[in-house]
Image (cartoon, rainbow, N blue to C red):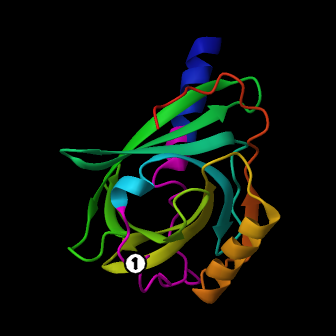
Amino acid sequence: MEFVSSVCLLSTLINGLSAMRYFEPTPGDMICPVSESKPNLDIRRFMGNWYILEYQYPREMELTDLSCLSFHFTESHEGIVGNFSFRFPPRFGHFYHIPTVSNVIANGQEGLWMTQFKGVDLLTAVVDTDYRNWAVFVQCVNEDGQNKFMSTRVMARNTDLTPQDWLTVREVIKGANLEANYKYEIDQSQCEGRPQHGK
């Protein structure tokens, strides 16, 4: 019975994470603020490990208590494969992995991807990055032919950023009008046993 309960809990968690926090539309949902991505994004340099340090949402979310969220991006014949990983329960739980597949929307727009996850179409934008330390990553969800703002994410190659890099990230987010009202820090400090990917 305990095993069945655990499976049901994990299933609920993954469904709740579908589209990395897909939510039902409300009259207050914001239109996607993304107008452009990083010019001439070098996809090969962007591939590899990224730790998610912060989520920003346009409205308050009842987030499941998660930790150690990260992406590992690779190129394949399918497109850009993102292995989304997290630990649940935090600190002492197991690590879980959810694959996503993205495709570049058009030549010259390498930072704009169309991502499909569980039948949901997402517009993914690598807004800016220095490749070595930080990246600002935004996703919008397509609903009834309109792209609605879903989240802004601060990602890093390491489990934290320097004060200068945090300042740069904040400036990028504000300058692109991507700052959301609700910010959630992701704990990356208790991640012993995290699976290691190649660079």
x and y percent of residue 97 in the render?
48, 33
Q: Is residue 113 above or below residue 58?
A: above
Residue 49 spot, x, y in % from top left: 52, 44
Q: Residue at x 20, y 46 (%)?
A: 78
Judge whether residue 196 can be spotted in this image.
yes
**Mark 1 crowd level (few <14, some 14–19, many ≥20, 10 Å Cα):** some
Can residue 1 be seen in this snapshot? no
In front of the other: 62 or 169:
169
In percent of width and height, residue 63 lies at 69, 52
Q: Look at the magenta stretch and give its main secondary structure.
A: loop
Which corner quadrant holds the N terminus? top right
Q: What's under tag 1, amino acid-wise?
A: Asn
**Magenta-colored span:** 14-42
- The residue wearing badge 1 is 147
1, 125: nearer the viewer: 125
Using the image, determine if residue 159 lies above or below residue 175: above
In the picture, measured across the screen, residue 101 lies left or right of residue 161, that is: left
Element class at badge 1: strand
Q: Nearer the viewer, residue 108 or 118?
A: 108
Magenta segment: does it hold 27?
Answer: yes
Q: Is residue 21 magenta?
A: yes
Residue 9 occupies quadrant: top right
As drawn, is 126 to the left or to the right of 168?
Answer: left
For residue 118, side relative to residue 32 (left or right): left
User: Residue 146, percent across and down?
Assistant: 36, 81
Q: Quadrant of residue 66?
A: top right
Which residue corresponds to the image point at 51% horizontal and 66% vertical from the top-left? 24
